[in-house]
Image (cartoon, coloured by chain):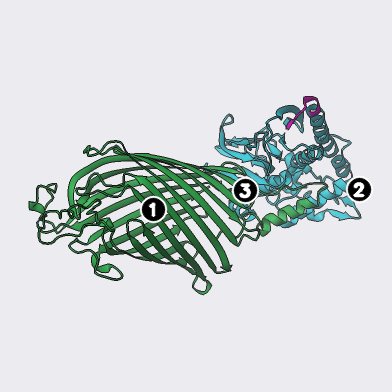
Amino acid sequence: MAVIKHNSKLPELGAALLGAAMTLPCIMLSAQAETAPEKGTLSFKYLNYKERQQVTSNAGSSGAWTDSQSSASAYDDRVHVKATATSVLLPLNGEWSLSGTLVTDSISGASPAYHTQSLSKLQDFRRAVDTSLTRYLPNGKLALGLSHSGENDYISRAVSLLATQASDDKNTTWTAGVAIQRDVINPVNQIVASEKKRGSDWLLGVTQVVSMNDIVQLNLGHYSGRGYFSDPYKIYDERPTDREHQTFQARWNHHVAALNGTSRLAYRFYTDTWGIRSHTIDAEWVQRLGSEWRVAPQLRLYSQNAARFYVEVDPRIAPFPTSPPPNALHFSEDQRLSAFGAVTMGLKVTRQLSVDTAVDFKVEQYGQKAAWKFNGLGSQGLAPFYARSIQVGITHSF
Amino acid sequence: MSSADKNLSVQRYPFRAMGSECEVVLAVKNQAQAYALAQKAIAEVLRIEKKYSRYTSDSMVAKINQHAGLGPVACDDETWALLHYAEQLHEQTQGLFDITSGVLRHAWDFKSAVVPAAEKLDALRNKMGWYKVVLQNQSIALPDVGMEIDLGGFGKEYAADRAAQVLQAQGVSSGYVNLAGDMRFLGAKPSGEPWMIGIQDPRRQDQVVATLPMIQGGLATSGDYERFFEIDDKRYCHVLNPLTGWPVQYWRSVSVAAPAAVVAGCTSTIAMLKEKEGLAFLQATGFDFLAIDSSNQVHMR
């Protein structure tokens, strides 16, 4: 918890050594380093992500739209990502720190082209570089971030500014941030060329320490973007050229001293100009076992209704893709814009190896089904979708 | 927080004191003024050297040692404070930090590289022990003839703090005092950046193992590489455990950053003396440290 200022109090031994020196004539003591990170951290994470979806029964024969996927297996592995990410945070001095993340991941697999079918295999290489420069102020910090990520078909650049300010008693922290992105899309299928997308994100948040054991946070977010939002790799995909969304999020962390554990509950509401409204409920319990182990089971429930221009599957003409309604200006058959519910179950186990080193292992299982929508039936004719990811990581502070 | 001022230029004034290379580094607007300020700081270092050296016969330390077994010696306020500091360190470390252990150097001659006979060490250990020293009425009495005190354990660091104090009193807010690696900082560089201080590799003299950014406070390093000899791959260094009379083994080097140089210096010395338990000790202090053990493993905070 960030309420206790670093170094505001030295351990007894350090204080005793200092106290002894106080008796020396005119030894003025310097205040210890302010609030900049005293320790650097280096972390290394390995992610293994696999998604699978039941291919509709006729998939194997619909050669026109699928990429000779095997019809023999009930489930096909679609996208398999292995990625490594390292990040470094170095304490440069009392006031500045430079952090950098180098993400290198390779993607080999297929993204569904319409609804749950696949059109093309993707092979690309992503290299993203993020750097952020943080200025520590007496009661807050100002972080400027720049990022650039390039795939062979998608270049994204972003600049962000995040400011936090704490009250004098450190019990209330306000956060305000803005990020501006500019993307250029040049799909390999050349359906469009040099399409652009610009957007800005705004964030306002407040974190309040309510008691020794409770901390709550409220966040408001606003996004406004203009440009090419369609997916060039999907057929029948023509989306509006602007999008705005609002998010509201409330979080509550509650520490139960008797159990030496912490519950983390969160609710998020999302609404956008495409007609999507979604609810996300997160529940996590972080249990400490001794001083070394931490086990955190996690459950996330998600539900959304469909975008206004989502084209529902027409079961009469399957396996062929449903045609958009005549004269429709906007249409999409992207499953992510359909009405569905999703459940994520996860477990993260962290072992503290030493004061400075921790290893963690996280496994997550994600399932998505129309029937899991909180209310209503959800979009019909879609195969459930499952993904599991395993991440192992090591974090070292120095 | 320090404010950056690009009009200041950094001036360096090297000098020799306490048998080693020292330096005053400061940034002020006017060079002539910088020189005058540096001279005041250097004069303070030399004053402390003269007053507390055990090599000169007219120092305060020499006077106390010459009176060993003869009765109390009256102390001025500064000496009294330093002796009190030594007493508190002795107490806090259960006798591991002991300024009477200097007599052991009569047994350990690092030039001739001979491991002393046990009888010789035992004889010297009879002349040691801060617990025997009588401190009262602002006077000190060493009870036995041949007993000695030696402020080498923190004298250099104390001088660095005092010299920095002189500069600070004159308004210097950027610079540092470096007495052979024991340092006290007075504020960031004129650019607002910290002073980047390399930590010497304990086995390769021309290399650094780490760089530590410093703005305020003190930094001190103790190591097994200043004076030592080796016999059959075993290193006998000049850091001697007063309870055994033998050189410590575990650490090659311990650097500590603390609010004052004198605190950093004692903390690094105590960690060396505690050997394996030094790591837990360092962690318990809350100070930043970098310690390299005998298998060349680096421990940091």
Q: Contact, CB < 8 Å: mark 1 with mark 2?
A: no
User: Do tags 2 and 3 sit on the same chain?
Assistant: no
List the residue tagged with mark 1. A244
Corner quadrant of residue A10:
bottom right
Query: How far apart are labels 2 and 3 at the CA level?
Result: 52 Å
* Upstream in sequence: badge 3 or badge 1: 3
Query: Count the marks: how many?
Result: 3
Q: What's the colour of chain A in the image?
A: green
Q: Looking at numbered disc 2 in the image, what kind of residue is underneath it?
A: Val
List the residue tagged with mark 2. B73
Q: Nearer the viewer, mark 2 or mark 3?
A: 3
Corner quadrant of residue A342:
bottom left
Q: Nearer the viewer, mark 1 or mark 2?
A: 1
Question: Quick check: is B122 in the magenta stretch?
Answer: no
SS at badge 2: strand
Residue A161: image x %, image y %?
A: 51, 46
Residue B188: image x %, image y %?
A: 67, 38
Closer to the camera in the image, A28 or A76: A76
Residue furthest toward the left?
A61
- Can residue B218 be seen here? The reply is no
- Label 1 resides on the chain identified as A
- Label 3 resides on the chain identified as A
Q: Looking at numbered disc 1 in the image, what kind of residue is underneath it?
A: Glu
List the residue tagged with mark 3. A137
Query: How far apart are labels 3 and 1 at the CA level?
Result: 33 Å
Query: How far apart are labels 1 and 2 at the CA level?
Result: 84 Å
Above or below, A271 against B166 in this view is below
SS at badge 3: strand
Q: Contact, CB < 8 Å: mark 3 with mark 1?
A: no
Above or below, A213 against B87 in this view is below
Q: What's the colour of chain B in the image?
A: cyan
